[in-house]
Amino acid sequence: MNDEFLQPISLDEPPPAPGKTKTGKKKPSGLWLVALLLIAGLMALWMLREPPVETVTVVPAATAIPAPTATPDPAQRLAAEAALEKVLELMRALRPAEPGRWAKEAWTQLESDISVADGFMADLKYREAAEQYTAVIPALEKLKDQLPALPESLMPQAFEAYAAGQKIDAVALVQIVLFLDPENEDAKDLLPRAENADVSFAHLKKAGNLLESSKWDLAYAELSRLKTIDDQFPGAEELGVKVEEILSAEAYKKWMSQALVALGNDDLISAEAWVKKALDLDPVNQAALDLHQQINDRMVQQKVLLLKREAEVFAHEEKWGEAHKKWLEMKALDSGAPWIEEGLAQSLKWKVISEKIRKGLADPGSDQTGAWVKEMQEREGWPAKLSAQADELTAGWQLAVSPVKVEIVSDYETQVEITKVGRWKPFARKELSLKPGRYTAKGWRYGYRDVRVPFEVKPGQKDLVVEVKCVEGI
């Protein structure tokens, strides 16, 4: 690069010829063009510049010198602090009882007045602060004096909030009562229920809406849920009574309808079960009572017919004792039916005869059996099996009273006697005809010990020999 361009040029000298330098050499033409453009740009910028801002010099004002602060009176400060301590003492006693809930306006005003007094204290205006604190003390003491009687007045408010589902207010009021009276039984009982007041109220409200919508089952279910949470919630019992009355009426209609349908289908067991449900709801309802009586009458009829069939089966089998028992059961159920009397009399007749035959067969030789045999000679209309039993009794009796040949053997030395039969002098053999039964033969002989020989004569017995001899000397 040529350093010629950096050399100073005298303003008094004429400019060199175009295209040449001072030394006569030729100058490049492009450089001049750039210089001209640069100068033109600078002139444009200068023309567009903003006018200069006039500078204003501010002279600071003179600083005022504060007046000296007066020294506070120590006595006033002590008075203010004593009044403040009294206020704080009363506030500490009142705050846990939340006066804002039961003395809202008075408490708000007191807090405002105390705030003003606090401002005076902060500004070291002890006289004004003492006066302000002292002014609020009577009002605070008045509130404090109300604390002992407060539980009695707050419990109704707490219960009202609880019943309205206002859990926060109800719990807060109960806790205030318990703070003032920790052994208050009503408050201790209400507190756990108040803690669920919002949920309980929601269940009650929903149950009421469902009842209005005729959704009784759902309303009942909602009340049941409420009962599991709080079975003493106000309004629940009354609403429950309404729901139960409606449900009972609906259930009564349903059960009576079911009973009538079952009766029409001759399903008496189901009909009785349904009508009993209806009577459980309304024990004095005449319609239910009449229907129950109608069902009972039908059931008696069915029972009597069943017993009649059973009695006829026993009669066919000639089990007269069982048949008579069935007729007695029918008589107990329906004493007015004449055909029951007829069946009862007939079954009794054959039962008595059957009993006589049974006893006669047990003792065929008795006089009573002989009397019964004579009674049973006439058998017109007798059942075949019973008549055959009478024939058996007659044959047994005849055999029992027919004499049996009995041979008594002795030794020509012994005298023999058979009670109610006879007494004989000594013999060797004697043939007697004795009725079946038990006998005792006695023998005696001078110089010998007496003998007694018991024996039994059985009906139809043959070759019965009884030996009677006295052989043992004295």
Image: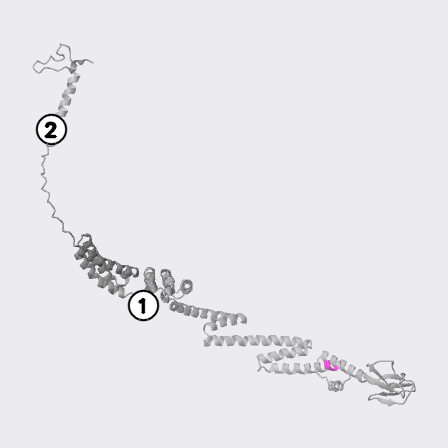
Q: Is residue 358 a member of the stretch shown in magenta?
A: yes
Residue 307 badge: none
Q: Is residue 254 visible?
A: yes
The part of the chain drawn in magenta is 357-361
Q: Is residue 334 left or right of residue 80?
A: right
Which residue is nearer to you in this view: 252 or 257? 252
Which residue is nearer to you in this view: 233 or 312? 233
Task: Tell me the SS state at disc 1.
Answer: helix
Q: Position of residue 355 (x, y in %)?
A: 70, 81
Residue pictured at 50% horizontal, 72% vertical: 276
Which residue is nearer to you in this view: 102 or 294? 102
Residue pictured at 20% horizontal, 60% vertical: 134
Q: Quadrant of residue 109?
A: bottom left
Q: Position of residue 183 (x, y in %)?
A: 36, 65
Q: Looking at the image, is mark 1 or mark 2 earlier in the sequence?
A: 2
Residue 152 badge: 1
Q: Residue furthest front?
A: 74
Which residue is nearer to you in this view: 210 or 64? 64
Q: Amino acid at mark 1?
A: Glu
Q: Is residue 294 a member of the stretch shown in magenta?
A: no
Magenta part, dominant SS: helix
Residue at numbered disc 2:
47
User: CA–CA distance between discs 1 and 2?
Assistant: 93 Å
Q: Amino acid at mark 2?
A: Met
Q: Is residue 98 left or right of residue 461?
A: left
